[in-house]
């Protein structure tokens, strides 16, 4: 029998570990707002033959695809670097510690490959000795910074999953991954808040950093024609005078994987998390900010 | 009186130093094909107030804008990291060692800021104690690898400057830099050569890596409507059956600077190299490849 929330709270050695246990036992849906001091992560699991192409894809597209860490090939219980999962590290499993998952496969339809996505609460039957899992940064990691400055987070306020869209911002090709675009997350703000929102989120480079586009013109320019037609997550209620603001999103690799599967460029099973349902890592967001500042040689 | 080519060959302590002296004394136009074992670099010089935004711009857009190094503020005679200029390092000056330069300013025209670009052979009268110079990777650094595999380099064969285009691939915003697109360089190949060209150039991440688009459809998709209408460099002669292949280009920051100047977002003088006329560094290209492979954790 699954433990209750209260039992998990007693068991857990840290807020991040507690969040992971809640996710493992399917007591959490979207992780937006969960364990707000900790970095959250998206997931892509690939057959190892495609790891180099995927690393190159991420290196070329660090705004939507900032790699935070990866499993060794075939080992779902460890992330390198080790600091990613540091509390109760013997109690971690990438196959269970996200709230829920996608498993990708293809069928033939009219002579073309069509991608099928199966939803699962764990990957215990899908992971093999040849799989490698990649953790990708997530914009949930800067949401606390926005709300601490008094900015409204539409999806948290309305108890929805953040809105996500496939766009025509080209994802720069790398090996088998080409021909797809950025996925973006969207939050609504007043036009006069945009510069503040840009400034607050800019330093969170490993969590997609500042927005990639904003305003109704911006939506148009990236190919979001109908703000109510989301590709992932929930459509949002837009209040009087608000405009959409778009960030790179760690669901981008799922779009890239779909394009590669359609071209029959991947043999074996690809897996991911369900958009909006992340892994909570042990990295403190404040430590990530310092690291980014040092790494880039920024003066402030 | 300027030294002759023969005198420079005797003076120089390395092929890279020799190339820099040839450029300093204006004995070189395009540096494509010059000192082919060495990494070449584009240039952007900014007032120091904009250094953080520029570093962030490059971190977010590493394909067109891979930072190789930078001067200390106000010191045109040193690049950090020091390995960039290691032969005769006391004989280096960023203000003279490119073949030729651009100096950007604005005038008022119909109530709008219009950007004026002045061409100069050195920046001795323009550099101030508040300037910082950034070196950005260059696709000339992978050209030798292409020709060693028997691939034709159209601009070298025809004694032209490489063709460059402003595109609608969005340059991801960072601070004052927003609203511009990638600049790309273009080389022509046969369609069946494209996968080989992608494979050869992929590892050269700090020199823009693999192409961002290819083919006539690709040209269309990035907004290159007329292949004969270049924004920088020379239009190329396209042979029977050839298609255009496009790479990120280190002239991209010049396009970003122009957009910022038009919005009056930069106080002080901005400078750059003239497209196609690069700095030859002391970094060996083979060392750069090893570094990239290690840094990304690639298996091959």
Image (cartoon, coloured by chain):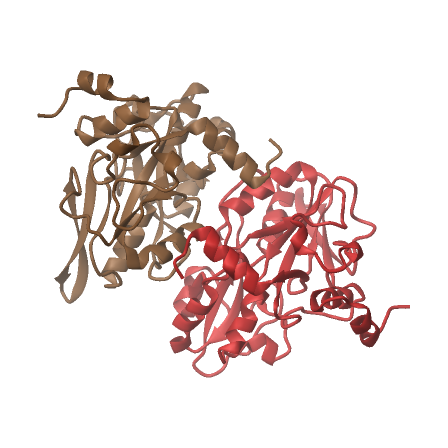
Chain colours: A brown, B red
Counting from the top left corner in percent of width and height, residue A30 is at: 25, 30
- Position of residue A71 in the picture relative to residue B142 (left or right): left
Q: Quick check: B182 above or below A286?
A: below
Outermost residue to the bottom = B240
Q: Nearer the viewer, residue B206 or B170?
A: B206
Viewer-side residue, B259 vs B8: B8
Quadrant in which the C terminus of chain B is drawn: bottom left
Residue at coordinates 81% horizontally, 66% vertically from top-left? B25
Figure disc tally: 0
Seen from the viewer's position, the closer of residues B207 and B168 is: B207
Which residue in the rendered view is the most extreme toward the left? A1
Which residue occupies 74% across, 54% down? B94
- Residue A187 picture quarter: top left
Residue A130 x, y percent position in the rendering: 24, 54
The extreme right residue here reads B1
Q: Position of residue A166 (x, y in %)?
A: 32, 47
Residue A262 makes an appearance in the image: yes
Instruction: Work out whether residue B164 can be spotted.
Output: no
A33 relative position to A262: left or right = right
For residue B241, above or below residue B222: below
What residue occupies the far front of the structure in this picture? A90
Q: Quadrant of the N terminus of chain B?
A: bottom right
Residue A113 x/y as whole percent: 18, 61
Tell me if A177 is positioned left or right of A59 in this view: left
| Left-right relation of B103 to B143 | right
**Quarter holding residue B83:** bottom right
């Amino acid at each position: 029998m699954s433990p209750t929330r209260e039992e998990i709270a007693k068991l857990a050695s840290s807020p991040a570990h507690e969040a992971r246990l809640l996710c493992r036992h399917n007591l959490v849906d979207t992780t937006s707002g969960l364990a707000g001091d900790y970095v959250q992560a998206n997931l892509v699991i690939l057959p190892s033959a495609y790891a180099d192409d995927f690393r190159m894809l991420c290196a070329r597209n660090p705004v939507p695809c900032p790699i935070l860490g990866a499993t060794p090939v075939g080992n779902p219980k460890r992330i390198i670097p080790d600091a990613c999962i540091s509390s109760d590290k013997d109690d971690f499993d990438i196959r269970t510690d996200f709230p829920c998952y996608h498993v990708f496969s293809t069928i033939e339809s009219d002579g073309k490959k069509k991608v099928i996505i199966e939803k699962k609460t764990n990957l215990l039957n899908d992971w093999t000795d040849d799989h490698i899992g990649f953790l990708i940064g997530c914009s949930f990691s800067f949401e606390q910074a926005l709300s601490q400055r008094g900015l409204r987070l539409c999806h948290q306020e309305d108890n929805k999953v953040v809105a996500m869209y496939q766009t025509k911002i080209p994802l720069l090709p790398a090996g088998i991954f080409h021909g797809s675009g950025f996925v973006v997350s969207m939050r609504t703000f007043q036009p006069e808040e945009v510069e503040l929102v840009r400034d607050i989120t800019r330093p969170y480079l490993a969590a997609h950093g500042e927005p990639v586009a904003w305003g109704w013109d911006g939506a148009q320019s990236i190919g979001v024609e109908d703000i109510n037609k989301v590709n992932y997550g929930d459509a949002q209620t837009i209040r009087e005078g608000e405009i959409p603001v778009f960030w790179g999103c760690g669901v981008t690799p799922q779009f890239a994987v779909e394009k590669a599967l359609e071209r029959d460029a991947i043999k074996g099973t690809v897996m991911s998390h369900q958009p909006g349902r992340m892994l909570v890592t042990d990295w403190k967001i404040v430590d990530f900010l310092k690291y980014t500042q040092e790494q880039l040689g920024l003066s402030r």
